[in-house]
Image (tube, rainbow, N blue to C red):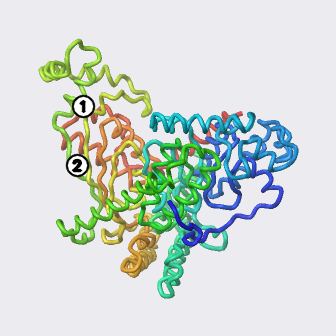
Amino acid sequence: MTGDATAARPTWWVEEFDDDERARLEPWFTNVDGPVFALRNLPETVKGALFARYSRTGKSLRRLFLDEFADEAEARLGVPNGKEDLEARLGVPNGNEDLEARLGVPNGKQGSEGGVTAARGPATGDRRAAALYQRVFDEYGDDSVAQLGGAHVACEQASNLLTKVLEWGRLAAYLEQSTRYVAYTDRPGGRWRYHLDPEVAADAGLGPEYRRVLDGLFETYAELLPALTGHLRRVVPHEAGSSEAAWRRAVKARALDALRGLLPAATTSNLGIYASGQAYEALLLRLAAHPLPEARTCAELLLAELRKVIPAFLTRVDRDDRGVAWSRYLARTAAETARVVQEVLSPADPGEEGPSVRLTEFDPAGEDKVLTAVAYPHARAGEAEVAARVAGLGAGDRARLLAAYVGERENRRHKPGRAFERAVYTFDVVADYGAFRDLQRHRLCTIVWQPLTPSLGYEVPPDVEAAGQGDRFGAAMAASAGLYRALAPRFPAQAAYAVSLAHRIRFAITLNARELMHLAELRSTPQGHPAYRVVAQAMHRLVAEEAGHRALAGAMRFVVHDEVGLGRLAAERRLEARRALAP
């Protein structure tokens, strides 16, 4: 990970903070101006609550902190009046340099490793911890040590293409700004919320066309939102027992669901990450090897901020013989694999294809294997003998055994144990990119996807068609596809920025029955987006009917196959009830 990141740095808007706000932010964030930054010195509960709110607001994390969390965070440390009181509280009366030293941030370059704990202890404690870590690693090569320290990081103004790269790792927690609850109708920094790639922007012909088309997509989105909301308010009944406010929020959510397909993959999002040092190292290596310039730039920014909070865990990332070599290996094998696939398979570009879910692989003995895993811990015999006994059970005894293991599930969060992981399924799915980006976040699944292009087509949402706006939606999709085709020859990695979320993508997803229970029950709920509800419902049906695993499918009793009208309404009612009970 070498070279000058500045030359390839994208243009982002810089949020303005006054001097007082900057002073209040500096103790808690590794920088106040950049789009990538780490959190420090905050209590874990505050960091968790910040990220929880992050996904449902259009605000940046730092603005959200000032508006809703700063007073509480400062009060917890007894520093109600901002940075000066924080410095006094931590015993650093001589300004920012002493504060950095107290926090273990010598020369303002290397950050505290332990949040509030480090802030209350001498900087030498951090140096000793770092030295101990390095000695353990050098002597034993124990990578697991890097699993024991972590950091909260915000990556703001990241395109939807970049968020899929950031969210690839399994051993991390992610919270992404929602396109279902946040209206993308504002223009922070004077520009719509989309990533402008520097190379594309610098192209005399394609740069202006890129901006013209993407501006047009956002303008159409912003113009159709009030029109569609007004239409839905006229045609969707106001159910008895629902407050006016809950009904209006549910109507707006349905309008946002219908129109999010207009947003291009260049649409920027705010992403919060919590991960261990080891997970960040793996992420940085992937980003550095990625063909998307935005990903490589993000790697540079992310490494700089992480080194302010967990420097000891990231010493290998930009070493030529370690991290740099690993990233080169990843990039080389990806490019060579793509070349060989083209040579030996000669894959043709697909034609337009409707949404579909196909069960492509499963083990016919999957239910037997689950029952064997259920019985094994309680049977004094080898697995082969237990499996033979299970195979000889009658239908009644098999049902009794599975029922005992599953128990009385009172809600979808009551899940049976790991025996369900013995049955594994692979599905080939064609769905819109919006649905894919939601399903891709299920980290226990193995998901691989094909390039995002407009070739598989799209579908005009029924609500948009009913509101008489189908032609405008179609015109926006045609503009999106035209820009993709113009970009692809010169900018193959960046061309997908132009593709709208309504366009379809093909992906394969492999998951076990336990994860399928989680995915299908969560993603089929009435408040779920229609595009991924149908995928979850189809997976559940195929396991029961095509795989023949009716007992396992039956245990997934909270999968919702009913069609729903105003899906968010029940959730809004529950939210109002919780607010009424809150102190």
Q: Left or right: where does residue 561 sit relative to residue 423?
A: right
Vertical comparison of 163 with 195: above or below: above
Vertical comparison of 460 with 366: above or below: below
> For the residue carrying disc 1, how many other residues have a C-alpha within 10 Å: few (<14), some (14-19), or many (20+)?
some
Q: Residue at x 39, y 68 (%)?
A: 460
Q: Is residue 43 among what the camera can see? A: yes
Q: CA distance from mark 1 to mark 2?
A: 17 Å
Q: Is residue 165 among what the camera can see? A: no
Q: Residue furthest top?
A: 380
Percent x, y of residue 33: 69, 61
Q: Residue at x 70, y 41 (%)?
A: 41
Q: Left or right: where does residue 378 sit relative to residue 134?
A: left
* Helix, strand or loop at mark 2: strand
Residue position for label 2: 359
Q: Which mark is residue 551?
A: 1
Q: Residue at x 58, y 53 (%)?
A: 249
Image quarter in which the C terminus is found: top right
